[in-house]
Image (spheres, grey):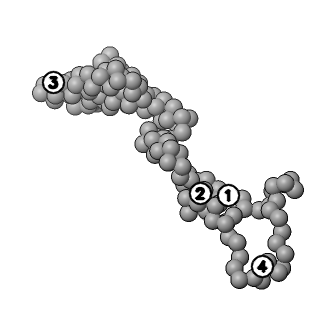
Amino acid sequence: MIAETICSAVSAAGLGIAAITAYRKRFLTATRIAAYSLVPIGLVLTGAVEWAVDTAFSLTAWIGFGLLGAAWLLFLTTRAVERRSGGTRKERKAARAAAERGAVAPNASAPSLGQGTTPAARPAAKKPKEAAGTGEDFSDIEAILKKHGI
């Protein structure tokens, strides 16, 4: 008797929190909270204590199984939507912050430093006498490195 009351209170509180979360436009999180809060009442309605006797013919047990199935489907749906949208909220926020400060993304490939495809994009070739002088000009390389934050 007391277990049913506690589980019902936990489920009601969880659904209230889910409603507040949905009001704040966090629908994936709200759906996940709703799924968690349906689990205790679903377990109570399955009649876990009197499982062997009442499960086959109890309407409330089948309703409980239905609620557990609904919670499971909600979990799967939120995972599928999360994967399609490009990761978790924390990952998207970190990627956005990295893009704003001009940092290179962790999964980005290294920039190509080879010669361009058009003759205008190619740097002028240095003569051997210039290279053998007192110092070589590395301003192009320094500019590229500064551009990429290295």
**From this viewpoint, is residue 127 visible?**
yes
Residue under circle 2?
A: 148
Seen in the picture, residue 86 relative to 63 is either above or below; the reply is: below
Asked whether, in this view, residue 139 is left or right of residue 9, the answer is right
Q: Secondary structure at mark 4?
A: helix
Residue type marked 1 = Pro
Q: Earlier in the sequence, mark 2 or mark 3?
A: 3
Mark in front: 4 vs 2: 4
Q: Residue at x 22, y 31 (%)?
A: 49
Q: Which mark is residue 111?
A: 1
Mark 3 / mark 4, whichever is N-terminal? 3
Nearer to us of marks 2 and 1 is: 2
Q: Secondary structure at mark 2?
A: loop
Q: Is residue 80 visible?
A: no
Name the image quarter holding the C terminus: bottom right
Which residue position is annotated with label 3?
A: 5
Of the residues tagged 3 and 4, which is closer to the observer?
4
Q: CA distance from mark 2 to mark 3?
A: 60 Å
Residue at the limit of the structure toward the top, as seen here: 59
Q: Alpha-carbon distance for marks 4 and 2?
A: 26 Å
| Sequence-first disc among 1 and 3 | 3
- Which amino acid, by three-letter code, is at mark 2? His
The residue singled out by tag 4 in the image is 131
Q: Residue at x 87, y 56 (%)?
A: 119
Instruction: Give the structural element (helix, strand or loop) at label 1.
Output: loop
| In-front residue for pair 54/78 | 78
Discs 2, 1 touching: Cβ within 8 Å: yes
Between label 2 and label 3, give the one nearer the viewer.
Answer: 2
Callout 3: 10 Å neighbours few (<14), some, many (20+)?
few
| Snapshot quadrant of residue 18 | top left
x and y, in percent, of residue 142 in the image: 63, 65
Q: Is residue 63 above or below residue 136?
A: above
